[in-house]
Image (cartoon, rainbow, N blue to C red):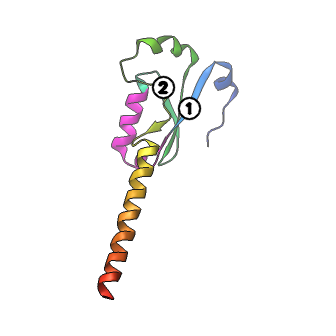
Amino acid sequence: MTTYGPDDLSHDWEFKIVRANRPLFRNRAHLQRLCEQEAVAGWTMVEKFDNSRIRFKRPARARLNDAMLPPGVDPYRVHYGLPPAAFAILLALTLIAVVGGIMGYIAYIFH
């Protein structure tokens, strides 16, 4: 992982990490889309930790422009893709469906 050098810390930078529930950033189109969306608020990619975490930085003075960002742009978002709660519900429903299907199949075989 990239360490913060004296230049990073002395020039008043903000840093953030954007996460995804799944390894979406292995797909170049998702990675490019994320970088383009973050650039609107002045963020630039510092490094890709893995396929689900990206570190960004921007000058702290970029905060002054946050009020002029287009509607729906959150300069401090830290999540990309399906919201975590929706992902958890989808995962639980999928698990229930799979277990139900297996139980139904077992019941059919032994009936």
Q: Is residue 95 above or below residue 65?
A: below
Q: Which mark is residue 84?
A: none
Q: Residue at x 36, y 75 (%)?
A: 102
Q: Which residue is mark 1?
A: 16
Q: Position of residue 48 (x, y in %)?
A: 51, 42
Q: Which residue is mark 2?
A: 43
Which of these two is toward me, 2 or 105?
A: 105
Q: Is residue 111 above or below residue 74?
A: below
Q: Magenta segment: does it hold 61?
A: no
Q: Position of residue 108 (x, y in %)?
A: 29, 83
Which of these two is toward me, 76 or 36?
A: 76
Number of callouts in the render? 2
Q: Is residue 14 above or below residue 104?
A: above
The magenta span reads 19-38
The image quadrant of residue 9 is top right
Q: Main secondary structure of the magenta part?
A: helix
Distance between the Cα atoms at labels 2 and 1? 9 Å
Res 95 visible: yes
Q: Residue at x 64, y 25 (%)?
A: 8
Q: Given contact means CB atoms under 8 Å apart, are the residues at marks 2 and 1 in contact?
A: yes
Please state if 83 lies on the left or on the right of 50 as rendered: left
Q: Position of residue 77 (x, y in %)?
A: 48, 30
Mark nearer the N terminus (2 vs 1): 1
Estimate how packed mark 2 is, as few (under 14), some (14 to 19) or many (20 or more) residues with alpha carbons within 10 Å. many
Estimate how packed mark 1 is, as few (under 14), some (14 to 19) or many (20 or more) residues with alpha carbons within 10 Å. some
Query: Which three-letter amino acid code belongs to the residue tagged 1?
Result: Lys
Q: Residue at x 59, y 24 (%)?
A: 14
Which of these two is toward me, 2 or 60?
A: 60
Query: Which three-letter amino acid code belongs to the residue tagged 2?
Result: Trp
Q: State which quarter of the image contains the C terminus.
A: bottom left
Q: Residue at x 36, y 68 (%)?
A: 98
